[in-house]
Image (cartoon, grey):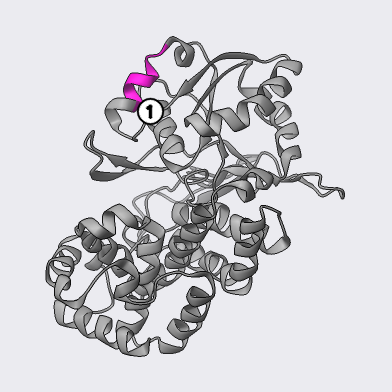
């Protein structure tokens, strides 16, 4: 039998927990985790122990080699940025900031002095633009500020960070570090980019080669952001748990997907437990334990789960319905992605007969103002046919333990209306 080594290389596992607001610096499974290396020698130090002939029969089918790269992170307040020079030092001394206009205005005055004091050179501060497109990312990659840098700091929300992933994918292949300024998506830790056309129309979920090397999460900045970001972020995050379990049910899954499914409870439990308290903290712009837990669920838990799950299990009916609902101008113009997905989760749970889970979520939604009925999304029943037709066209609705039909979706939506 051919032996596969599983090498879990954890380059940094550092937990610093100091009182008085010091950062909790946790490099979670940093470096390369789960690299299966096929060897001809069972133990590298004992070359006399050889494998049997490769032509020998195996009693199981050997999977392809898997490399799983998971980013590490630092979580804290403003002091989280004090950890930056030490962590990024192995990657060079020249840094380019790329981000959104507001994010750069907030973060750069804090971060630049820290980096320059530590001997780093800032090659430039570049606004990413207005949209994450492949063309935009490749154009930014040609900027001299980017070309001369050893590494890129991605500063801002999901679109800014996703644009940096495109910059660092081709042709630069530069390492990048993320500095999220809103708790709305898992972009800071995931390796995918949500890519749009120049006309701001969704184009694809782009699978990049590498995620960020490390994410620096400053919760003092997150809590000061407009409340709609964490509010919608909670809706999108709870979907990760319910959609992944729904789509993977009854299917044979590999080790990575099983790990992702197990971790996905951390996408929903902290939000059900502390979502209402987190919203109060956001409204007051003062951190509390609930806000920090919810922020980590949105950014960290979802990022890790997304990286572990097979692509087809990363979304399902809730996202399919979201894509259908956004065909309606009133929904597209006045409602956020996570808000719409949150409603889709209720439809999914209703259709799947998970009434107790749905009712528990509805309590939270009502407490924080997430939608529970069509009216909350400026929708009426007569507007549903094109919505459901579009939802059934996208791949998200096709990976399910049973066939998702127009009739099933209509019945679930009607039952949800009655539950309100």
Residue 165 visible in the displayed image: yes
**Residue placed most toward the observer, 132 or 40:** 132
Main SS of residues in magenta:
helix
Left or right: where 416 falls relative to 16: left
* Quarter location, residue 340: bottom left
**Residue placed most toward the observer, 21 or 101:** 101
Q: Pointer 1: residues within 10 angstroms few (<14), some, or many (20+)?
A: some
Locate residue 141, reporting x and y percent: 39, 19
For the N terminus, give its image quadrant: bottom left
Residue at 26% x, 66% y is 321
* Quarter location, residue 273: bottom right
Looking at the image, is 61 positioned above or below residue 384?
above
Residue at 40% x, 26% y is 167
| Secondary structure found at label 1 | loop
Locate residue 192, reporting x and y percent: 39, 44
Looking at the image, is 218 positioned above or below residue 133?
below
Left or right: where 159 falls relative to 72: left
Looking at the image, is 8 positioned above or below residue 140?
below
Highlighted range, magenta: 137-143
For the C terminus, give its image quadrant: bottom left
Locate residue 5, reporting x and y percent: 54, 49
Left or right: where 118 falls relative to 72: right
- Residue 138 colored magenta? yes
Locate residue 308, reporting x and y percent: 46, 55
* Quarter location, residue 246: bottom left
Reading the image, the residue beneath label 1 is 129
């Amino acid at each position: 039998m051919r032996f596969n080594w599983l090498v879990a290389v954890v380059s940094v596992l550092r937990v610093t927990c100091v009182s008085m607001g010091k950062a909790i610096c946790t490099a979670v499974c940093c470096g390369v985790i789960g690299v299966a290396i096929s060897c001809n020698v069972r133990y590298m130090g004992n070359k006399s122990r050889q494998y049997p002939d490769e032509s020998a029969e195996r009693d199981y089918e050997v999977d392809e080699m898997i490399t799983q790269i998971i980013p590490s992170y630092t979580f804290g307040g403003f002091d989280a940025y004090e950890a930056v020079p030490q962590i990024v030092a192995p990657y060079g001394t020249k840094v380019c900031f790329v981000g959104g206009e507001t994010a750069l205005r907030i973060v750069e005055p804090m971060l630049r002095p820290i980096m320059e004091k530590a001997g780093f050179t800032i090659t430039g501060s570049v606004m990413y633009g207005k949209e994450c497109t492949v063309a935009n990312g490749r154009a930014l990659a040609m900027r001299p500020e980017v070309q001369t840098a050893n590494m890129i700091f991605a500063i801002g929300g999901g679109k800014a960070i996703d644009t940096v992933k495109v910059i660092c994918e081709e042709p630069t292949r530069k390492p990048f570090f993320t500095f999220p300024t809103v708790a709305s998506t898992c972009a800071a830790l995931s390796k995918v980019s949500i890519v749009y056309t120049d006309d701001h129309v969704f184009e694809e979920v782009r699978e990049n080669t590498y995620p960020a090397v490390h994410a620096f999460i400053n919760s003092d900045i997150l809590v000061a952001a407009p409340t709609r970001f964490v509010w919608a972020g909670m809706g999108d995050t709870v979907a990760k748990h319910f959609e992944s379990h729904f789509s993977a049910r009854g299917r044979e899954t590999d080790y990575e997907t099983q790990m992702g499914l197990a971790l996905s409870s951390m996408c929903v439990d902290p939000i059900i437990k502390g979502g209402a308290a987190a919203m109060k903290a956001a409204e007051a712009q003062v951190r509390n334990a609930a806000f920090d837990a919810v922020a980590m669920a949105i950014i960290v838990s979802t990022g890790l789960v997304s990286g572990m799950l097979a692509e087809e299990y990363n979304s399902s009916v809730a996202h399919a319905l979201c894509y259908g609902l956004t065909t309606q101008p009133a929904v597209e113009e006045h409602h956020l992605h996570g808000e719409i997905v949150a409603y889709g989760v209720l439809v999914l749970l209703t259709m799947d007969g998970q009434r107790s889970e749905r009712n528990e979520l509805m309590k939270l939604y009502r407490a924080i103002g997430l939608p529970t009925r069509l009216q909350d999304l400026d929708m009426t029943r007569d507007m549903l046919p094109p919505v459901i037709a579009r939802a059934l066209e996208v791949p998200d609705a096709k990976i399910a333990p049973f066939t998702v039909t127009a009739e099933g979706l209509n019945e679930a939506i009607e039952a949800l209306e009655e539950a309100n």
